[in-house]
Amino acid sequence: MKDRVQDARDLAGRPRAAHPRLEPKRREVRFSKLPDGQADRAHRWLGEWNRLESARGPHPRGVSVRYLLTDYTLEGIEERLQARGFHLDNTLYSKLVRALVAFSEQTQLRNLQTPERLLKQSNEVYVQAWEHHPHGDRDEMPPELREYR
């Protein structure tokens, strides 16, 4: 597959480009009411992580995190928090937000792994491919059926 993509790039005269610059994700992790003080402890613990910024969130039991998708995912952060003994908010709203964010981040990660699409000059690839294939006016229908009406 990669050879085909590189061949298409060569035919179109386009260099191999890196993925566009990723913007940091800003998410909020909410904790349950009990035990008290989870947000403060999580904020301090997350502050020790490399390439992850943490701050107290707008919600009283929340922590805002900022990260690049290539380094972390919200699902992975929450799993590590739960393994550490933190209890996340399990309201329906929080579960829906978590599911939506997990789906969108997984999709973005999959899209980052796919090769860049050739949008400009892609018609040149098809023109050159068409020139290499036999073509012309052909009617595949047998002559006896063509003249029958």
Image: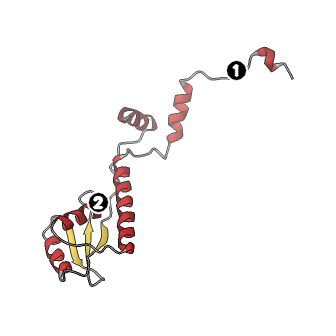
At 21% across and 71% down in the image, what residue appears?
A: 53
- The quadrant holding residue 98 is bottom left
Q: Amino acid at mark 1?
A: Glu
Looking at the image, residue 37 sits to the left or right of residue 61; the answer is left
At 31% across and 70% down in the image, what residue appears?
A: 26
Q: Is residue 100 above or below residue 111?
A: below
At 40% across and 37% down in the image, what residue appears?
A: 5
Looking at the image, residue 56 sits to the left or right of residue 125; the answer is left
- The quadrant holding residue 135 is top right
Q: Amino acid at mark 2?
A: Leu
Looking at the image, residue 129 sits to the left or right of residue 101; the answer is right
Q: Which residue is mark 2?
A: 69
Image quarter where the N terminus lies is top left
Residue 28 at x, y = what percent? 30, 74
Residue closest to the eye, 83 or 43 = 83
Secondary structure category for the residue under label 2: loop
* Colouring of the image: secondary structure
Marks 2/1: CA–CA distance: 53 Å
Secondary structure category for the residue under label 1: loop
Residue 88 at x, y = what percent? 26, 72
Q: Is residue 66 above or below residue 149?
A: below
- Number of residues whose C-alpha sits closer than 10 Å to that of mark 2, classed few (under 14), some (14–19) or many (20 or more): some
- The quadrant holding residue 11 is top left
At 16% across and 70% down in the image, what residue appears?
A: 85
Residue closest to the eye, 119 or 109 = 109
Q: Is residue 12 above or below residue 52?
A: above
- Number of residues whose C-alpha sits closer than 10 Å to that of mark 1, classed few (under 14), some (14–19) or many (20 or more): few
Q: Which residue is mark 1?
A: 140
Residue 94 at x, y = what percent? 35, 72
- Residue at the top extreme? 144
